[in-house]
Image (tube, grey):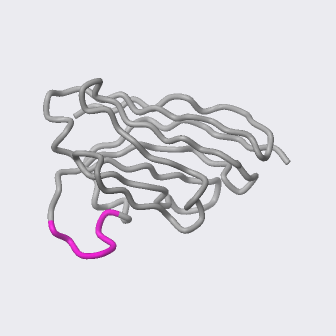
Amino acid sequence: VQLQASGGGLVQAGGSLRLSCAASGRTFSTYVMGWFRQAPGKEREFVARTSGSGGFTEYADSVKGRFTISRDNDKIIMYLQMNSLKPEDTAVYYCAATTPVYGGTYYYTRALSYDYWGQGTQVTVSS
């Protein structure tokens, strides 16, 4: 599957952005989809993920209550709605996909668990 992330930009603290991840392929609904981010000088970190149907979601503690992940399998697209943005949310955001496996509690929070990656979109939050 090929992924294309978009929607990043510059926003003031407290503002909102919605990221999109457009995918190719008719098997989109079979993939677990996730969002990760990477700030300069830091490792790529988990943000959120959703099951193939979209019925199950998981969030990093740092974004819980502020970010919402969703997907539209008919349109073959995934979203990340980001509200109440903080300067520490500044990073390049990546969408990713992987086939579902039983890998334990934290399996889908690890970047290495994902097989397909989009190119990244920059989010900058000014204070």
- Left or right: residue 57 versus residue 60 is left
Q: Residue at x 14, y 34 (%)?
A: 27
**Is 32 one of the magenta-colored residues?**
no
Q: Residue at x 16, y 43 (%)?
A: 30
Q: Position of residue 22 (x, y in %)?
A: 36, 28
Q: Is residue 59 above or below residue 106?
A: above
Residue segment shown in magenta: 102-108
Residue at image location 32% in from the left, 32% down from the top: 72
Front residue of 96/69: it is 69
Q: Position of residue 59 (x, y in %)?
A: 46, 61
Residue 36 lies, in percent from the top left, at 46, 52
106 magenta-colored = yes
Rendered view: 12 above or below 40: above
- In this rendering, would 121 be left or right of 41? left
x and y percentages locating residue 19 in the rendered image: 52, 35
Q: Is residue 20 left or right of residue 107?
A: right
Q: Residue at x 66, y 52 (%)?
A: 89
